[in-house]
């Protein structure tokens, strides 16, 4: 019996641990040949010596289960390293069909304390890293489409976060990068649709080394059941978005965790005010807008615990 991703090849970045590892294993389980990319630094802030061990270990897991996988040690924030990653997939498997961007680091700090390097490093790995791999994958698909004289198969799954939606006080760099990834994804979806390529973005909630502080207070199951925040709740959606079944899903933002997928609509207008004359005066704006906000909480953000349906320990 054929599998949904039989005959397809995939790159998963940041796949040595956590979400990326679960996604690489899922794509392989569905039949894809996988390039497992990870820079292998031990610190979640991108510190420590790079190592091929995390990527190679995941690649070995895939091969041990009967799949095909190669490891790639590379920093996707480097333009030429991203080029080499895409070239490795093409040289190894003949072409690239699926790109899953997951690599990232954290350097949390309040905006008034954040250094320039803490800002730049997170933007570079998350946002520029997504751009770099997408750029070379897109060029590959465009070239193939021109040679074929029509659409080809291509799937991009990018990784954002609800930090860009709800705000995250100590993560201005991370929230900005994740918001940028959404914009990058929707632009890419429009640009590549005619070539047969889709691009979607997920906001996953999962317990990994990147989020160990965020979810430290949420209870893990005591009965040995699957943690509601396990990365294995996220990876099936990635597998679906990478598959032919998702051909009509393009330019979408999806929140996923614990057996739940939510499709997020683009922002809607909450209220609209028209000037009584050619343009607004200060007093008229005060009369119209101030009452609208008068009875609202000062910070309307998502209540994560309520949405998750979890209780803190």
Image (spheres, rainbow, N blue to C red):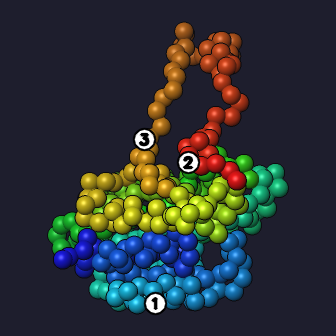
State left or right for residue 174 relative to residue 272: right
- Find the distance from the CA under tag 2 to the CA under tag 1: 34 Å
Above or below for 285 versus 95 = above
- Residue on which the image places disc 3: 265
Q: Foreground: 151 or 313? A: 313
Say which residue appears at 56% left-offset and 48% top-offset: 308
Count neighbours of disc 1 (C-alpha within 10 A) and say few if under 14, some if 14 to 19, many if 20 or more: some
Label drawn at residue 146: none
Q: Which residue is mark 2?
A: 308
Q: Which residue is mark 1?
A: 60
Q: Does residue 142 appear anywhere in the picture?
A: no
* Residue located farthest toward the right when viewing the structure as drawn: 113
CB under 8 Å between discs 3 and 1: no
Q: Of circles 3 and 1, which is in front?
A: 1
- Which of the two discs, 2 and 1, sits closer to the camera? 2
Which quadrant of the view contains residue 227?
bottom right
Taking depth in this image into account, of 109 and 69 the one nearest to the observer is 69
């Amino acid at each position: 019996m054929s599998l949904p991703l039989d005959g397809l090849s995939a790159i998963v970045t940041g796949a040595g641990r956590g979400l990326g590892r679960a996604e690489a294993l899922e794509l392989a389980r569905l039949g894809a040949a996988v390039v497992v990319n990870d820079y292998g630094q031990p610190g979640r802030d991108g510190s420590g010596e790079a190592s091929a061990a995390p990527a190679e270990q995941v690649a070995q897991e895939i091969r041990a289960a009967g799949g095909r996988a190669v490891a790639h040690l590379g920093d996707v924030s480097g333009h030429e390293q991203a080029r080499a990653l895409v070239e490795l997939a093409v040289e190894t498997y003949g072409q690239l069909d699926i790109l899953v961007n997951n690599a990232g680091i954290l350097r949390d700090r309040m905006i008034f304390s954040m250094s320039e390097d803490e800002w730049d490093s997170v933007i570079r790995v998350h946002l520029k890293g997504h751009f770099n791999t997408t750029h070379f994958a897109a060029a590959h698909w465009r070239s193939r489409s021109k040679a074929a004289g029509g659409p080809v198969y291509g799937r991009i799954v990018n990784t954002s976060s609800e930090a860009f939606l709800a705000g995250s006080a100590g993560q201005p760099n991370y929230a900005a990068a994740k918001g940028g990834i959404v914009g990058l994804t929707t632009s890419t979806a429009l640009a590549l649709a005619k070539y047969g390529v889709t691009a979607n973005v997920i906001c996953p909630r999962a317990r990994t080394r990147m989020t160990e502080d965020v979810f430290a207070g949420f209870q893990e199951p005591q009965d040995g059941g699957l943690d509601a925040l396990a990365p294995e709740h996220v990876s099936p959606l990635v597998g679906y978005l990478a598959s032919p079944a998702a051909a009509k899903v393009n330019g979408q933002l999806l929140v996923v965790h614990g057996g739940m997928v939510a499709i997020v609509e683009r922002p809607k207008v909450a209220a609209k005010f028209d000037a009584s004359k050619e343009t607004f005066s200060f007093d008229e704006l005060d009369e119209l807008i101030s009452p609208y906000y008068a009875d609202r909480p000062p910070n309307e953000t998502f209540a994560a615990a309520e949405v998750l349906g979890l209780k803190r320990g």
